[in-house]
Amino acid sequence: MLTSTVQLTGFKFGSIQIDGVVYEYDVVIDRGEVAKRKKKASKPYRGTYAHTPLSLAENIPWNCRRLLVGTGAHGGLPVMAEVRKEAERRGVKLEALPTKEAIRALGKDPEQTNAVLHVPC
């Protein structure tokens, strides 16, 4: 069970405010802790997707029942099929939504939910 939640108080194209701190880059929320998404490991797939996708090469916060992926203001962040398969294997419900919708969804059962939120576009 996740032990803490975060307060997402603002999102606009290019930035997100979490617990009073403004972030202008992708973030990972893992059991209430906010960190920068380290997407370098997924960069080799960028040519295939025209965007750096979420891949298993990244440190995905699997310790949850539900994983929200905020795909950006216009839904541009791809989630690779291998990530979806791994979520299913682990029994984690993966939801990929535009970031604004993912933020709203995070308010439902936040104690059981981790997130990867695409912010810049």
Image (cartoon, helix red, strand yellow):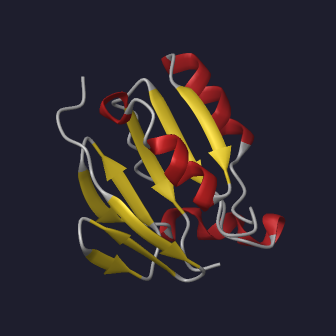
Q: Answer with left or right where residue 105 lies relative to residue 63.
A: right
Give whichever of 46, 5 is nearer the camera: 5
What residue do we see at 53% from left, 42% from top? Answer: 105
What number of labels is visible?
0
Q: Relative to 74, is 15 above or below? A: below
Give whichever of 86, 27 is nearer the camera: 27
Of the 4 image quadrants, the one containing the N terminus is top left
Of the 4 image quadrants, the one containing the C terminus is bottom right
Give x and y (percent) for residue 40: 49, 71
What residue do we see at 38% from left, 42% from top? Answer: 61
What residue do we see at 56% from left, 66% from top? Answer: 118
Q: Relative to 74, is 67 above or below? A: above
Q: Answer with left or right where residue 101 lies relative to residue 45.
A: left
Q: Answer with left or right where residue 12 lies relative to residue 27.
A: right
Q: Relative to 27, is 24 above or below? A: below
User: From this viewpoint, which residue is outermost toward the left?
Assistant: 3
Give x and y (percent) for residue 8: 37, 60
Give x and y (percent) for residue 120: 57, 80
Quarter of the image where one finds residue 109: top left
Q: Relative to 95, is 97 above or below? A: below
Give x and y (percent) for residue 92: 51, 23
Residue 4 appears in the figure: yes
Residue 57 appears in the figure: no
